Image (spheres, helix red, strand yellow):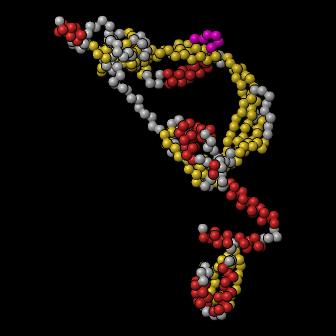
């Protein structure tokens, strides 16, 4: 930093020969004239002094009887003095300094830290929607407001902070933890069948079991009731709990046409390029789009300097014309495709089920290969449903209020 300051102010080389050079240095120190890089040999001493303070050295040299000589000048003042006839060069340097100063007033890049499970590409897109992107004017950025917008508009973020360091805007984020589902055991409920099946095992923890092993049950049937009766015949309601394991069956189906039309791309015939400089987008290579039936493929290239991203990127759009082609499949080919689709269908529909048996059926209908998969599974079919009780009403009609009867008999 000191060297940079000396370079801006300018400095010169000096050399003293003969006389009392030690007294010369003492005069410089007493008058607070800063000299550096001093080198001495016999009665000769040399070093550097700032351009402004060099005017005092001839007086010191005369007072101590030493010969003073100045050498080459360094720094910006000397550079401008030597190149004052080169007006264009000086104007160019001034413009470059102005551009650097102006560019330093904007954010060049946006960095995201602290995110692990969320997609960074999606986060960058969402940050742009809340007004955080490269090319922002730094004095106009309200960091607190941007933080609030992030927390309000981006799901899965529990904490955020927006910091600016030089031309880099850093968004620190902390992902919110997924809270486990809390079951309120104080709320009375029934356990009902989520799917039809045949009961295989029963594990009742609370409530009254309304089914037996081997029973066939239908969807929505009460399996464990939240209404219980004690040995005295009194009724109460509880939060029913338990596991009802049953054999269930699922029928999945995939369809593959034996003949279909598909659009295939030709060789890229059109290409256009757009540049993004600090958030300002402009097209520098133009191309007209095909009249009809085409699709666009985009490629985004960013540039880096010493692992630091600079605020310049190039987007290339290649436009492909499409040609329509009819594809005919044999039944063997259609079966192979249907089997792959069935694997995907099973992963989505039965991923959490224990499959005990599976069978497949193939049929051709309306020029399509139809594959049906019948999956036998074992699963817990119970789900809880709250018991709705209206306030100030009796739980069961027809149940006599024994307390009232006892009070009336006592009064008699």
Location of the N terminus (image quadrant): bottom right
Q: Is residue 396 left or right of residue 367?
A: left
Query: Which residue is depicted at the point 57% across and 44% down?
Result: 145
Q: Report if residue 225 lies within the magenta region.
A: no
Residue 263 vs residue 154, the one in the foreground:
154
**Residue 131 appears in the figure:** yes
Q: Name the image quarter holding residue 149.
A: top right
Work out whether 404 lies above or below 352: above
Query: How far across and down, in percent of the image, does residue 306 sit?
Result: 62, 55
> In the figure, is residue 53 to the left or right of 375?
right
Which residue appears at 73% of the width and 73% of the height?
Answer: 78
Q: Which SS does the magenta portion mostly show?
A: strand
> Residue 138, image x and y in percent?
63, 51
Whether residue 364 is in magenta: the answer is yes
User: Can residue 199 be seen here?
Assistant: no
Left or right of residue 119: residue 313: right
In the picture shown, does residue 31 fall above or below 310? below
Span shown in magenta: 363-368
Choose top left, top right, bottom left or bottom right for residue 270.
top right
Residue 61 picture quarter: bottom right
Question: Residue 183 placed where, x, y %?
Answer: 37, 26
- Residue at the limit of the structure toward the front, as seen here: 411
Which percent across, then down, holds residue 298? 69, 37
The residue drawn where x is 30% and y is 21% is 205
**What residue do we see at 66% from left, 77% from top?**
50
């Amino acid at each position: 930093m000191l060297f940079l300051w000396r370079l801006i102010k300018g400095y010169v080389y000096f050399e003293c020969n003969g006389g009392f050079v030690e007294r010369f240095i003492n005069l410089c120190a007493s008058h607070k004239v800063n000299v550096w890089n001093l080198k001495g040999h016999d009665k000769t001493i040399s070093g550097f002094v700032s351009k402004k303070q060099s005017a005092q050295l001839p007086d010191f040299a005369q007072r101590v009887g030493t010969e003073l000589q100045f050498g080459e000048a360094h720094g910006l003042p000397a550079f401008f003095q030597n190149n004052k006839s080169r007006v264009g060069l000086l104007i160019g340097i001034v413009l470059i300094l102005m551009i650097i100063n102006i560019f330093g007033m904007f954010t060049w890049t946006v960095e995201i830290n602290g995110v692990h499970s969320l997609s960074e590409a999606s986060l960058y897109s969402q940050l742009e929607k809340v007004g955080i992107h490269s090319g922002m004017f730094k004095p106009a950025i309200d960091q607190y407001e941007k933080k609030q917008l992030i927390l309000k508009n981006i799901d899965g973020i529990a904490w955020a902070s927006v910091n600016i360091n030089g031309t880099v805007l850093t968004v620190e984020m902390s992902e919110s933890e997924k809270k486990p589902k809390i079951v309120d055991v104080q709320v009375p409920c029934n356990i009902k069948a989520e799917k039809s099946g045949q009961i295989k095992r029963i594990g009742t923890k609370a409530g009254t079991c309304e089914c037996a092993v081997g029973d066939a049950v239908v969807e929505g049937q009460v399996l464990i009731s939240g209404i219980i009766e004690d040995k005295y015949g009194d009724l109460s309601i509880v939060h029913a709990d338990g596991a009802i394991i049953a054999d269930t069956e699922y029928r999945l189906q995939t369809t593959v046409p034996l003949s279909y039309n598909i659009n295939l791309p030709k060789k890229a015939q059109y290409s256009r390029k757009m540049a993004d400089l600090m958030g300002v987008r402009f097209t520098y290579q133009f191309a007209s789009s095909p009249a009809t039936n085409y699709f666009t493929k985009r490629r985004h290239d960013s540039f880096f300097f010493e692992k630091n991203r600079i605020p310049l990127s190039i987007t290339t759009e290649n436009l492909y014309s499409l040609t329509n082609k009819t594809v005919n499949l044999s039944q063997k080919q259609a079966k192979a495709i249907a089997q792959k689709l069935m694997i995907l269908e099973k992963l989505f529909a039965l991923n959490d089920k224990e499959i005990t048996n599976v069978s497949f059926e193939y049929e051709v209908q309306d020029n399509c290969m139809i594959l049906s998969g019948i999956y036998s599974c074992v699963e817990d079919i119970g789900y809880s449903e709250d018991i709705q009780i209206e306030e100030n009403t009796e739980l069961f009609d027809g149940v006599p209020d024994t307390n009232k009867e006892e009070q009336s008999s006592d009064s008699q």
